[in-house]
Image (cartoon, rainbow, N blue to C red):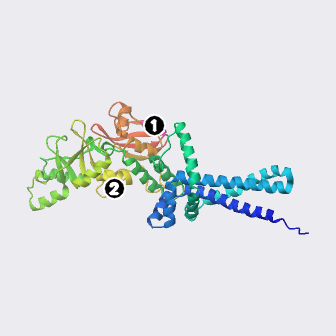
Amino acid sequence: MDSSEPPSTQLYFLVLAILLLLSMFFSASESSFLSASRLRLRYLSEKKNKAAIRTENLTRQKDRFLTAILIGNNIVNIATSALITAVSIDLFGNSGVGIATAISTLVILIFGEILPKSIAITRPESIALKLSLPLSVCIVLLTPLILLFSGITGLITRLLGIRTAKGPRAVTEEDIKTLIEISEEEGLIESKEREMLSNIMKYSDLTARDLMTPRTDIVAVSESSSIAELLELSRSTSFSRFPVYGDDIDDIRGIMYIKDFLYATEHNPDTNIRSLIRPVFYCFEGQTISSLQAKFHEKKQNLAIVLDEYGGTAGLVTTEDLLEKIFGDLQDEYDKAAEIHAITPPHPEQQSIPATVPGWIRLDEISEKLGISLQSDFYDTLGGYLLERFGDIPAPGSQIIEQGFVLIVESVVGNRIETIRLQPEGGTA
């Protein structure tokens, strides 16, 4: 008597193996296609990679390929359960039903779900490319069922008043911000790069008012100034250009570059400032930075006078201001701000505070650097915030304590707080 298993049982196990492979295929397809990077697929598609083009086309028809995967997976899983039940009853009789339930649940869960999906998410793009051709074939074969179930699903959602989105979900600004943060956490980008990318994200929301040098800090020259006065001003500030005004600062006539002045006076010592004035363009406080940047490019200029709602001078903004909002301080040999101690030290081993900062530093910027929250309903700068807190123009040495920090007025020029000393509460200057 032959003790080997009957051919029917051997066939059962062969079919079972095929069904499990199909279940693994559908589960791996689902995880890899949904986890694959759209950017990576787009890059490979542009390189004329046929598998990438096919994969990208499938991901654009997400409803169609998901329906195909769900139909295929359910068919093979149901068939697997039925086959295991049949084999169990054949081997164990009626008690095989309970055994079949336990075995089929375990087998499908491990080999049909956990294992293939765990493998797929480790290399989603690579696996998606390999499975794209057989999945395309399956979608074609399952098209009648896909149309049937899609029609039924669409009818039910319409009856329930549910609107389904057409096409892929649009990438939002919050998605990009989250991607930037995750990239830094995973070491794909440096902290400085993350800061630059975050600044770019904020860029479109900024206006000229957010970046301008305020009216009170503008260093300008009168068109009637003497050569000696202009040379002294240039030496004391190290600025390479100055707005030129007529009657007062609200009457800006144009911009004068020191290089033009030096060249002209070398050939003609009696040169008049008026003859060296270059045109200046104007913008309003609410003008967006993106449109302002376009204007700078169009007019081939790098400085604009910012007007308030009444047409008076509110401040000035330069291309350097725009770049600094993304890249941080751009200090060179002409930058007077380099004389002010930066709150962020050049070497990590140095202490960031105590530090001296300019009065015009923005509240949101200093709050972010110190990890506190300074807010004002009327002022955007730290100097303005202190004016509000003191209720008057403070004398040098005046101080207040804010959220664990001592803010000391270091110098005052006219009605403006020039510099402020920061130190931790209980610390020493």
- What secondary structure do most residues of the magenta stretch adopt? strand
Q: Can residue 407 be seen in this view?
A: yes
Q: Is residue 137 left or right of residue 372?
A: right
What amino acid type is highlighted by mark number 1? Answer: Glu
- Provide the residue designation for mark 2: 331
Label 1–label 2 contact, CB within 8 A = no
The amino acid beneath tag 2 is Gln
Mark 2: few/some/many CA within 10 Å (<14, 14-19, 20+): few
User: Residue drawn 19% across and 56% down?
Assistant: 258
Which of the labelled discs sits on residue 139, or is there none? none
Residue 262 within the magenta-colored segment of the rendering: no
The N terminus - image quarter: bottom right
Image-based side of 38 in relation to 332, left or right? right
Place of residue 127 in the rendered image (x, y in percent of width and height, measured from the top left): 58, 63
Q: Is residue 429 visible?
A: no
In the rendered image, which quarter is residue 418 located in? top left
How far separated are the C-alphas under marks 1 and 2?
A: 29 Å
Residue at x 69% of width, y 59% of height: 19
Q: Residue 304, position in %: x, y?
A: 24, 48
In the image, residue 183 lies at what x, y percent? 51, 55
Residue depicted at 60% across the width and 60% down the height: 122
Whole-percent x and y of residue 354?
A: 44, 46
In the image, 143 versus 298, the foreground residue is 143
Q: Residue furthest bottom?
A: 2
Q: Left of 408 or right of it: where is 137?
A: right
Residue at which label 1 appears: 402
Give the residues drawn in magenta, as a range. 400-404
